[in-house]
Image (cartoon, rainbow, N blue to C red):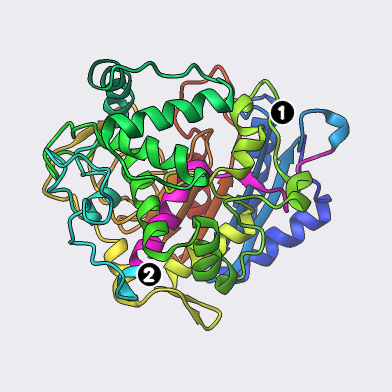
Amino acid sequence: MANLLTAQQLEDMCFGAARLGFRPERLMLLDRVITGWVEQRRVAQAMIVKVTRGGEKAFEAAYGQRGLHEEEGPMALDTIVALASITKTVTATLMCILQEEGLLELTQRVRPHYPPLSGDTGSDIRLWQLLTHTSGLSDEAVWEHIPVFVREKLELTLPADGAPAEEQRDFCLRVREKMNLPDVDDEWLAEDTWDWLRGATPPSHPPHTVMAYCNEGYQIAGRILSRLTGKSLDELAREKIFDPLGMPDTHFRLPDEKIPRYYRRSARCLGHEWLNNERAMRQEGGGGGIKSTVSDICRFVEMFLNEGALDGVRILSRQSVRMMLTDHNGKLPSSFWNGEHLSPAWGLGWNIRGDKFDDAGMVRGPRAFDHGAYAWSKITGDPAKNVAVAVFNSQPADSDSWNWGAGHINNMVLGALCD
């Protein structure tokens, strides 16, 4: 399904981008290529793309189908999409904001801020290492360790997936008794108990010796943000980032009135069972959980391109933005992630291009920063060209490629520039 722009509207948009330094014919080629991907089902269901330069729109179009059934209509530019791991850039930004406000210092050890972390081998992990994926923690190790720990150390049995709420509550209470944990309100019982279970897993490596992409580190960072402020991630991000930046459609917990605009994926799409359910719409975690539109998330990228401020509103100092967009892993060896051996270059929350041969586009510059998400979405900023790109994509369920399409689009966008 082609985008909803008329031929004249498309031409006006692309030729209007000439004043921003783009070659119109190349942007019109971009539209034809994406249309072909959707029609050939290389993209499972739909795609939305937005490109800005200097904060001004150069290209914006939606393709494909918005909901599970054709009668739900075509994809729209204001569709709200689950952005999974792109959340990590928001979490890292909040950590840096709290550092500027004096609530933490990123060189501090994690454990005083997060007591559930294993005291035996996790006591040397620093806060900044959670954000550069060099904490030594491993997602795989956590989920392999928990059943063994529960069975052998606590002599308990994990409740089955989907077990009744009362059974899960009883399990949490028994865990707390065995681990001698303090009482907590029922509202936080499950969350706090699982924090302690995950925290009992020893790191797989000493801190800052290996770059290993890790959701668990960001989940811990999210918990620390809430512990320090007494606010949920949704409340904190809205106060510190979303409202000041003018991102009205970005949420962790999607309001009921916006659920009709939420992108629901067909069975052709990877992750449709998880991403379509109400839990995903309310998910709130430091490693994944935000839902947003292309217009909102481009404003977030533009804030970084503008060194911490946008439209007269400052979110971060220039120094903090530069710190976030600096590679802090330069002395580490290449690591196996994204299914291949890659440079470990990473800032605080952002993948940094450097000399990396990855999936975000070879035409982007060495200072370019980006972050991908489960099911093929990606946001990118290239400071050398002052260009922001947001790609909301739909990965086919039978595809094992990682973030296919976004790199092609980044190459085409940056290749369309005259300067």
Quarter of the picture containing the N terminus is top right
How far from the left and from the top, in percent, is residue 344?
Answer: 22, 43
Drawn side of residue 10 relative to residue 91, left or right: right
Observer able to see residue 359: yes
Amino acid on which the number 1 mark rests in the picture: Glu
How far from the left and from the top, in percent, is residue 175?
Answer: 35, 29
Q: Residues within 10 Å of mark 1 (few under 14, many from 20)?
A: some
Drawn side of residue 330 relative to residue 190, left or right: left
Residue found at the very far right of the displayed protein = 71
Q: Residues within 10 Å of mark 2 (few under 14, many from 20)?
A: some
Drawn side of residue 199 relative to residue 75, left or right: left
Q: Magenta part of the protein: which range?
A: 73-96
Quarter of the picture containing the C terminus is bottom left
Instruction: Please tell me which of labels 2 and 1 falls first in the chain.
Output: 1
Q: Which residue is mark 2?
A: 97
* Residue 178, placed above or below residue 124: above
How far from the left and from the top, in percent, is residue 398?
Answer: 55, 16
**Residue occupying the point 30% across, 56% down:** 348
Drawn side of residue 318 relative to residue 402, left or right: left
Could you tell me which secondary element the residue under label 2 belongs to? helix
The CA span between labels 2 and 1 is: 43 Å
| Discs 2, 1 touching: Cβ within 8 Å | no
Is 82 included in the stretch rendered in magenta? yes
Q: Which residue is mark 1?
A: 39
**Residue occupying the point 27% across, 17% down:** 148
In the foreground, 138 or 381: 138
In the foreground, 35 or 26: 35
Amino acid on which the number 2 mark rests in the picture: Ile
